[in-house]
Image: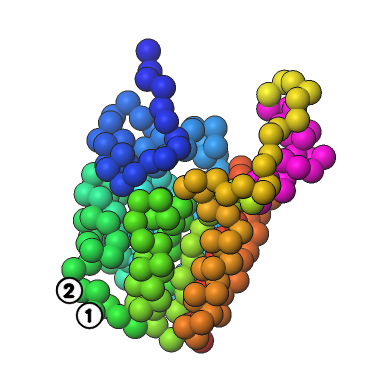
Amino acid sequence: MKKQLQFEDLRFDDFRMRARDPSLSRHEKVGFPNDYREGKEDCIFDDVFRKVKNLKENNKTILEIGPGCSQIPIKLAEICRQNDNKLIYVDSKEMLDHLPDAPHIHKYYGAFPGALGNDMSTLAGKIDAIIAYSVIQYVFVEGNLWAFIDHCLDLISDGGEVFFGDIPNISMRNRFFSSNSGWVSHRKFTGTDERPYVNVNKASLGKMDDSVILSILSRARSQGFHAWVLPQTDALPMANRREDILILKS
């Protein structure tokens, strides 16, 4: 009998352990139930590809932080190969061992930014696109989110982009479940007529909310970058409670 998996409050070492567990699917290894991600990876990648313009360009340097071991970083690797782009992965060795090796790929083992070591200064101002998809919520709990963001901003080139994707926002979730459409969704999921409990006036410990999302925009903009919140396409499984942030160095 398969053990009951936890999908909340995961840490970097939890993902390392999951990556080593052969009984888990690639979705479970990266922190999602199968029904949240199965059949959705093409749509997820297409949504990212549409939003990050430098992924469509040639001879760029792309950095993915926390790629995990799903099909999404593999799709990114193929696009980078086609466009003659250099691709850098930063994640645990356990995760990155599941991803292919290729001449255009360089792997740094460990957590960002420490895994880059002295190359942080070498790469400063030379990265054309940084992607961290479904990552910064874990940094928010376990690490220093503001240092993480500042290090990303230090790395990007003129015209470079930082894409923080699939950010769970508890305020957005509360707004959804306070609405009639949220009630219908909850009723369909639970099979009951009970309205979902929503406490809009209390911060949720360890959860990102509007105040954090807007502070990220403010921090980037105060350093001279453009920054926007972007909605996810409706086809994604949690588009009603997750959103993306795009930062541009002009």
Residue at the spot x=61%, y=42% of the render? 237
From the top left corner, tell me how far across and down residue 159 is, in percent.
Answer: 47, 84
Q: Identify the disc placed on residue 118.
A: 2
Residue at the spot x=78%, y=23% of the render? 193
Disc 2 element: loop
Q: Which residues are magenta?
A: 172-189
Circle 1 is placed at which residue position?
Answer: 122
From the top left corner, tell me how far across and down residue 62 is, in percent.
Answer: 37, 70
Q: Is residue 109 above or below residue 104?
A: above
Q: Is residue 199 above or below residue 243?
A: above
* 2 and 1 marks in contact (CB < 8 Å): yes
- Left or right of 108 on screen, residue 227: right
From the top left corner, tell me how far across and down residue 179 is, in percent.
Answer: 79, 43
- Indicate the quadrant where residue 238 lies: top right
Name the amino acid type tagged 2: Asn
Q: Is residue 234 magenta?
A: no
Q: Is residue 178 magenta?
A: yes
Q: Is residue 65 above or below residue 125?
A: above
Disc 1 element: helix
Residue at the spot x=49%, y=62% of the render? 164
Q: Identify the disc placed on residue 166.
A: none
Report the magenta stretch's main SS.
helix
Question: For the view shown, which residue lies furthest in the right direction?
Answer: 180
Q: CA distance from mark 2 to mark 1?
A: 7 Å
Name the amino acid type tagged 1: Thr
Q: Is residue 204 above or below residue 233?
A: above
Question: For the view shown, which residue lies furthest in the top direction?
Answer: 1
The answer to whether one can see residue 177 in this image is: yes
From the top left corner, tell me how far across and down residue 200 is, in percent.
Answer: 68, 47
